[in-house]
Amino acid sequence: MKTLCLLAMVTAMTAASLEKAKGGEVIYVASIVEKTVTTFTVNPDTGELTKLSSLMLPASPGAMDLSPSGKYLYVAMAGRDAKTNQATAFVATLERQEDSTLLLSAVAKIATRPPYIRADDSGRYLMMAHYATGEINVYRIQDGIVTSEHLDYHKTEKTAHCVEMDPSGRFVYVPHTTPNAIYQYVLDAGTGKLIPNDPPVVSGPAEGHQYHQPRHIAFHPSLSMAFTSNERGGGISAYSLNRKTGTLKLKQTLSALPEGYSGGAAAADIRITPNGKFVYVSNRDLEDRDPQQDSIAAFSINRRGDLQRVGTYSTVWFPRSMTVNQSGRFLYAAGQKSGTLISYAIDTKTGALQPLKTYDVGDGTIWAMCVE
């Protein structure tokens, strides 16, 4: 009888836990050293994270993206061939279960490791930016599963860091750091091919500017604006977006570093709150010092798309990736060198950050993504 009661209690607790995860928000965190993607549930009221599961992958994970249907999580992976020791690259398709845990559905071999991947809005194409080789590739997604079917290739320049789409899903942008440029494309929805826009490239802030070299790009949810993190020097730029042609025009550039900061710094990720009021840039301290001076810069966005600094906040070591939850109340930053994830409360009136809690995830915490 006691055994039956205990079993009933465990079953009830498990069901309650699964029901809590089902329909709520979760954060997926990739650890490049541990070769895992860990799932955390998000408390919508407090931002508290609870570890739900951890999935071991066959190679080291990196960039992630969600299918438009929300059913699949795509994960870029890199490894070494056991026989030849040659670098290999793949994309894993992970199927999200009802409780938001993950199952490995398929692995597709690709050309080289991409630091950023993006599924198009139709869910038929996966676009990739390739940093080391300086190229962009497009692969077919068939019934939600990424395949090795290669659809398009563009040779650009080295340090292609990111590939993103505008809110319409018609235009594609690939920031490159070293050439200080953003490549602009039109997506052919019927074939998955990328057509160079006119002009095909827009320059970042002038090379003489302290804050240049666009790395990641994010689009405003309602204004005709895009924003980039500028890796060199640690900065942020605002671009106006021509919704008809899909072309960008540089409008404003600001520092994203703490006041009085000295030494080398490299901006990494950029995230906008769902209501479009605030934008955040993570900065990686490149100096060998203790304590490290990594930070997150917060900016407000007015109705014209102009930026104004809110503040700069200490964060985890080497914050390569960030994510904002769907309510826009919480921000999470992944420390690649600390192996941790830190949570912040966002002041919804000012955009200021209040640190909440730091979570151990695993060595090489490289990507974090909050989804429903």
Image (cartoon, grey):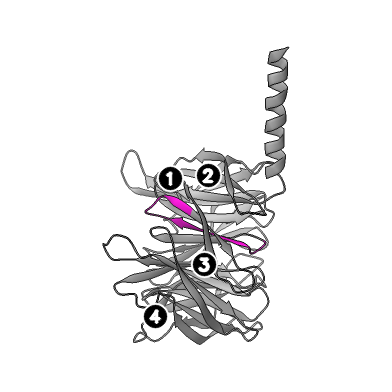
First of labels 1, 2 by sequence position: 2
Residues at marks 1 and 2, CA–CA distance in whole angstroms: 9 Å
Which residue carries the number 3 mark?
163
Q: Are marks 3 and 2 in contact (CB under 8 Å)?
A: no
Q: Position of residue 347 (x, y in %)?
A: 60, 68
The quadrant of the picture occupied by the N terminus is top right
Which residue carries the number 1 mark?
362
Q: What's the magenta region?
A: 327-341
Q: Are marks 4 and 3 in contact (CB under 8 Å)?
A: no
Residue 64 visible to the viewer: no
Residue 261 as seen in the image, left or right of residue 351: left
The residue lying toward the viewer, choosing from 204 and 360, is 360
Q: Are marks 4 and 2 in contact (CB under 8 Å)?
A: no
First of labels 4, 2 by sequence position: 2
Examine the rendered structure and indicate whether residue 281 appears above or below residue 33. below
Q: Is residue 334 magenta-colored?
A: yes
First of labels 3, 2 by sequence position: 2
Q: Disc 3 marks which amino acid?
A: Val
Q: Position of residue 346 (x, y in %)?
A: 59, 65
Q: Which dot marks residue 211?
A: 4
Q: Disc 2 marks which amino acid?
A: Thr
Residue 13 as seen in the image, left or right of residue 47: right
Q: Are marks 4 and 1 in contact (CB under 8 Å)?
A: no
